[in-house]
Amino acid sequence: MDEKKGIVNAAGVNENPMQVLENEHRAILVKLELMERALQCLQKGPEETVPEQVETEKALLKELVALLERSLGLHFQKEEEALFPILAEYVGKEHGPIEAMLHEHEKIRSVFCEITGPVGMGMFKAVSKSGFEAIHLIRQHISKENQILFRICESSLSEEEKRRVMEKIKAMSMGPLKKGSRKPRI
């Protein structure tokens, strides 16, 4: 069996935490593509669009931002609370890939906050700029995690450590947050 694929349990669910996180990345990238298209459409002048299309794209953008806010928040929580603490035993938390990923999480959260407000005509320029910046940052971040961080995890973590990470990821995915845990929002 391909080692990257990991173990598939009886229910057909992948048990490799890095593969699960990469699958979440793919879903996030689809949402980013749709968000980018909506922003591009809304940038067009009135002569290139019809009012109904503008309203449809605004509604789509608002929905995508809400979906991304929830999915990225939970995804970041899985990495920060399940994966990074165990990986830190091998690569340290400071001056390395974990510190870089945490810094990028904060940067993405900061830029994302700028686009979570209403998309009114007066605010669209600022929302559009922040939206495109968020898309760019998230795509770069995902690429780094997929190509570098998760490869480090695959070669460093034991099967038992991967199992522990996966248990934590499952717990975060299925249930309410533990008291004191960070809310799964950007």
Image: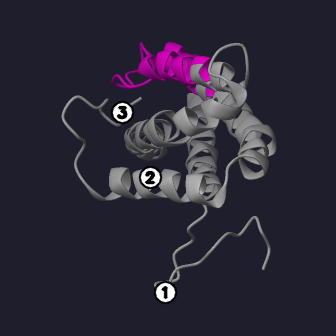
Mark 2 belongs to which amino acid? Ile
Please tell me whether mark 3 sits on a helix, a strand or a loop.
Answer: loop
Q: Residues within 10 Å of mark 3 (few under 14, many from 20)?
A: some
Q: Which residues are magenta?
A: 103-132
Number of the label disc, if any, that sits on residue 185: 3
The residue that mark 2 highlights is: 169
Magenta span: chief secondary structure? helix
Q: Is residue 37 visible?
A: yes
User: Is 35 or 56 nearer to us in this picture?
Assistant: 35
Pair 3/1: label in front: 1
Mark 2 vs 1, N-terminal side: 1
Vertical order, 109 against 51 (above or below): above
Give the distance between the C-alpha atoms of the residues marked 3 and 1, in whole angstroms.
32 Å
Colour convention of the picture: one colour
Q: CA distance from mark 2 to mark 3?
A: 16 Å
Total numbered labels placed on residues in the image: 3
Residue 97: x and y in percent read: 72, 26
How many neighbours does mark 2 have within 10 angstroms: few (below 14), some (14-19), or many (20 or more)? many
Eyeballing the image, is 2 above or below 127?
A: below
Q: Quadrant of residue 71?
A: top left
- At 62% from the left edge and 32% from the top edge, which residue is drawn? 89
Residue for badge 1: 10
